[in-house]
Amino acid sequence: MLQVWGRRSAFNVQKVMWLIGELGLAHEHIPAGGSFGIKETPEFLAMNPHGRVPLIKDGETVVWESHAILRYLAATYGGTALWSDNPGQRSVVDRWMDWAQCSLQTTFINGVFWGGFRTPQEQQDSVALKASIQRCTEHFQLLDQVLSKQAFLGGNQFSLADIPAGTNLYRYFELEIERPVIPNVEAWYARLQERPAYREHVMIPFAEMRGKLDF
């Protein structure tokens, strides 16, 4: 059976769990990281020398790094609907996945969520936080333009392109921060919320993380 290591509240783990839910894969979830430990054990480090989650083991195959896991699961169990076998069409998905990780996630999760929500107020860098919120505004305005022409990031059907960027939405819309008018992103978010796997694995309350740099 597919095994998955990581905390359900961990952002990158949520991407993987969402896809597992979409694919309806039987799996064993092994809590790891934070108060659960495990990542520092010799057994875990033998599978991932970086000592990070998420990590999956599928038979004899071990995969780490969230986007590598997404691509592996989609290629192995998702057919071509989520990740096309046409190189050109597949590149559309890959571009949005890479952008979500390198631009959106870096700005929102690292800059806004960690810099604001998870950092105790007395330790926050207000100038850097304000800059990150503004950069997020620009990212979501860009997404709003793209989604004015299509229902999902990869086109008019849900695909792997939606998972890395879409995982940000629940926390983004729940935080008490200034947000731009982005009706097309909000409509996309509403469509994602119709998916049971999204509600189960991404829409997880995170209030206990407020002001905590360790978890």
Image: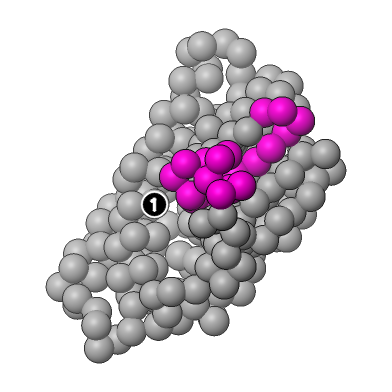
Estimate the x, y position of residue 43 in percent, counting from the top left: 61, 47
Q: Which residue position holds label 1?
A: 105
Tell me: 1 left or right of 110: right
Tell me the quarter of the image containing the N terminus.
Answer: top right
Can you give x and y, in whole percent of width and height, for residue 184 in the image? 49, 51
Q: Residue at x 53, y 45 (%)?
A: 45
Q: Is residue 188 visible in the rendered structure shown here?
A: no
Instruction: Look at the picture and state if 87 lies above or below 33.
Output: above
- Is residue 73 shown above or below 207? above
Taking the magenta stretch, the answer to whether it contains residue 55 is yes
Identify the element where label 1 is drawn. helix
Identity of the residue drawn at 69% across and 47% down: 4
- The residue under the point 25% across, 88% down is 122
Range covered by the magenta-colored residues: 42-61
**Left or right: 16 in relation to 141:** right
Q: Nearer the viewer, residue 168 or 24?
A: 24
**Residue 52 visible in the picture:** yes
Q: Residue furthest bottom?
A: 122
In screen coordinates, is 142 left or right of 191?
left
Relative placement, left or right, of 95 versus 157 is: left
Circle 1 packing at 10 Å, graded few (<14), some (14-19), many (20+), is: many
Q: Residue 71 location in percent, x, y?
A: 58, 29
Q: How many marks?
A: 1
The single residue placed furthest to the left in the displayed view is: 127
Query: What's under tag 1, amino acid-wise?
Result: Gln
Q: Residue drawn at (25%, 56%), measured in percent from left and top?
A: 135
Instruction: Check residue 74 for magenta coloring.
Output: no
